Structures are given as C-alpha cells and as structure tokens.
C-alpha cells in the first residue's frame, strides 16, 4: 500500500514537472496576481455550490488525509517520502482549517440554525479550535522531520498523529450526524 502511494506521488511529480516546466509565470504554488479565468470560475463555482454536498465531499477528502496520517503513525520511526509529509502539512495548516471555517460561516451566516441548536454550534466552534491547535502542533513536528528518513522523536510524533486523527474522526462523525442536519435545514430554507 505504501509502495503504491510512493509510486503515485512519483508519477504525479514527474507529470507536474513535465506540464509546468515550460510555463514562465505562475504555478500552483505561486498565485497569479490577476487571473480573470480564476476569478470567473471561482464566482461560478460559488453560485453552483451545493453546500451540504460540498461539505460531504470535503469530509471524504479529509478522511483520506486522516488515513495518510494513520499510515504515517503506523510506519514510525520510518517516515514517508517528503512529498507526502508536505501534502499532509499543507492540509493540516491550510485546507482543513479552511474547511472548518467554511462550515462555521455557512451555518452561522446563512440564516443560522434554530436557537435550540446554538449549543451544538458553540461545541462545533470549540472542537474546531481544539483540533486546529493539535493540527498546528503536528504540522510543526512534521516540519522538524523534513529531509529525514527516520523521525527524531517517533513516540511523540506517533502520539500527536494518533491524537489528531482520533479527534478528527470522532468530530467528523458527530458533524455528519448533527451538522449535516443543520446544513440541510438551511439549504431547504434558501
């Protein structure tokens, strides 16, 4: 399984280099200062977005990242390739927190849930904040592993990695039970 992931990462890297090396400006890592295409697509995607379906599909993506974190914890003290560590770190620092903020925004600013569900909203925000703190710590630990084949502190890294994926899996199960119902209610009211 790990070999397949490594091979897939290698193929993706080679393909990305082949397609992006002729480009003189812009890449996925360097934002284009002005892109009418990007702006138009972003506007259109925003208009067409079905919030509950989008959050559900993003949860599937987050679950895949959590599976990678679990694989990382299982293989310690050995580390996966740097490209895998970089991808996990990017999700921990950027993608997952952005997803959480979008959940909060959608549920709080789109007419908001019923008053009796406000305690659930407060819990959602508190859990997001706690999970973000653990994610930041894990990302920092992964940064310390950059360029290494073995983790400098495998017990600590394994503990934080397992803590994070267990907290997130429990939280996401709760969200899928409670928050999905709230999101559907808001979508139905629109």
Image (cartoon, rainbow, N blue to C red):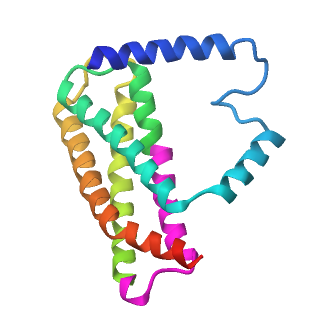
Q: Residue 128, percent across and down?
A: 38, 61
Can the viewer see residue 136? no
Q: Please say whether residue 112 is visible from this viewpoint.
A: yes
* Looking at the image, residue 166 lies above or below residue 139: below
Left or right: residue 94 versus residue 65 is: right
- The residue closer to the viewer here, 169 or 134, is 169
Instruction: Give the quadrant of residue 173.
Output: bottom left
Residue depicted at x 40% and y 21%:
82
Query: Is residue 175 positioned above or below 63 on the image?
Result: below
State the image quarter where residue 3 is shown: top left
| Residue 155 locus on image (x, y percent) | 16, 34
Query: Residue drawn at (36%, 88%), measured in percent from left and top?
Result: 116
Residue in front for this viewpoint, 183 or 39: 183
Prevailing secondary structure of the magenta residues: helix
Residue at 57%, 75% in the rendered image: 109
State the image coordinates of residue 9 (x, y, percent, origin top left).
Answer: 44, 18
Q: Is residue 105 magenta?
A: yes
Q: Quadrant of residue 68?
A: top left
Residue 113 colored magenta? yes
Quadrant in which the N terminus appears: top left
Position of 114 relative to 133 (above/below): below
Residue 157 placement (x, y as % from top left): 24, 36
Q: How many marks?
A: 0
Location of the C terminus (image quadrant) = bottom right
Q: Is 22 situated left or right of 166 in this image?
A: right
Would you say 38 lies left or right of 7 here? right
Q: Residue at x 48, y 12 (%)?
A: 11
Q: Magenta stretch?
A: 93-117
Q: Residue furthest bottom?
A: 115
């Amino acid at each position: 399984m790990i070999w397949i992931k490594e091979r897939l990462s290698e193929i993706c890297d080679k393909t990305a280099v082949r397609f992006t090396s002729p480009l003189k400006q812009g890449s996925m890592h360097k934002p284009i200062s002005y892109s009418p295409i990007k702006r138009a697509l972003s506007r259109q995607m925003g208009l067409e977005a079905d919030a509950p379906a989008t959050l559900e599909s993003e949860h599937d993506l987050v679950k895949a990242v959590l599976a990678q974190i679990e694989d990382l914890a299982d293989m310690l003290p050995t580390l996966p390739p740097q490209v895998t560590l970089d991808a996990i770190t990017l999700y921990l620092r950027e993608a997952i927190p952005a997803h959480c903020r979008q959940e909060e925004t959608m549920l709080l600013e789109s007419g908001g849930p019923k008053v009796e569900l406000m305690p659930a909203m407060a819990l959602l925000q508190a859990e997001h904040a706690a999970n973000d703190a653990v994610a930041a710590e894990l990302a920092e630990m992964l940064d310390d592993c950059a360029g290494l084949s073995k983790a400098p502190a495998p017990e600590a890294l394994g503990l934080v990695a397992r803590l994070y994926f267990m907290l997130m899996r429990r939280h996401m199960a709760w969200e899928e039970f409670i928050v999905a119902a709230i999101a559907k209610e808001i979508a139905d009211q629109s």
